[in-house]
Each structure stands twice: as structure tokens, then as C-alpha cells.
Amino acid sequence: MNGHLDGAELADLALGGPAAQAVALAARDHAAACGRCAQELLGLRRAVRAARSLEPGDVPAEPPPGVRAAVLRGLHAGPVRPPCRAAAGRARLRAAGARRAVLIVFTLAVAALAVAFAATH
């Protein structure tokens, strides 16, 4: 493993269970020793914990207007003009990891909405 953990590795660790077991031991060690990755992992774990703690009545049947469009805009947003090629490559990698993490959290939220909708109908 070179550098920091990518978004997929951090998401797997945050989700726990079989996904976390599949992540290489080196990735888990890195997350424990690297402040930056530890902070990102902590934020993702908080999001996962919050999504898993939702009860059917905790969320509306449908998200407010504009939420889906805002999330999709955020997934497609990227740096406007990176200062150099190396920075551009790193920015693309960070953006891709962040998009994966947002997509996972968005998927969890949609699943929670589906549970809430199913419980009320």
C-alpha cells in the first residue's frame, strides 16, 4: 500500500463486518497510525452508526426537494484548476475516494428511507 487509504478502503473499514475483514491488515494498521486517515475513518464510522440507528419514524418517506440533485452535484464536483500534474492526480484520487464514501452514505440513507416507507405502508 502506498500513501493514504482510498475512499473504498475507508468505507469498508467504517461499514465493518465482512467488508472490513476483507481489507488488508496493512490498511487497518495504516488507519490506526495515520491521523488523516483516522479522522476520515472516524467521520465515516459516525455516519454509518447514525444511519444504522435510524428507526422507521426517524426519516420522512421522501427526502426534501432538491436533496438528490445536491448530492449528485457534489459527486460530480471536482477541482477547477489544480496547480500542477502531480497535484491534479492526487486531487482526482481524493475526489474519487470522497465520491465513493458519499455514495455509500447516500445508499445507506436511501436504504433507511426504504425501511421507513415499507414500515408505514
Image: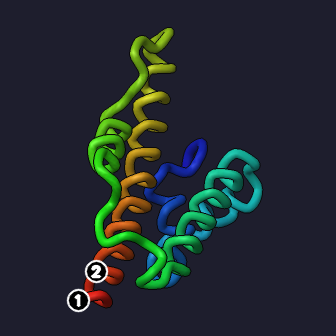
Q: Are marks 1 and 2 in contact (CB under 8 Å)?
A: yes
- How many residues crowd mark 2 within 10 Å: few (<14), some (14–19), many (20+)? some
Q: Residue at point 44% right, 57% down?
A: 8
Residue highlighted by disc 1: 121
Q: Residue at point 59% right, 42% down?
A: 3
Q: Which of the 4 image quarters holds residue 111? A: bottom left
Which mark is drawn over residue 117?
2
7 to 57, vertically: above or below? above
Residue 51, position in %: x, y? 50, 72
Q: Is residue 21 visible to us here?
A: no
98 to 21, vertically: above or below? above
92 to 81, vertically: above or below? below
Could you tell me the amino acid type at mark 1?
Answer: His
- How many residues crowd mark 1 within 10 Å: few (<14), some (14–19), many (20+)? few
User: In the image, 99: left or right of 54?
Assistant: left
Q: Residue at point 50% right, 9% down?
A: 83
Residue 109, position in %: x, y? 39, 67
Camera-nearest residue between 20 and 70: 70
Display coloring: rainbow
Give the Cα separation between the discs numbered 1 and 2. 6 Å
Q: Residue at point 57% right, 60% down?
A: 44
Which type of secondary structure does the marked residue at label 1 adopt? Answer: loop
Camera-nearest residue between 120 and 11: 120
Q: Residue furthest left?
A: 121
Residue 68, position in %: x, y? 29, 50
User: In the image, 15: left or right of 96?
Assistant: right
Camera-nearest residue between 4 and 64: 64
71 to 91, vertically: above or below? below
Residue 105, position in %: x, y? 43, 61
Image quadrant holding the C terminus, namely: bottom left
Could you tell me the amino acid type at mark 2?
Answer: Phe
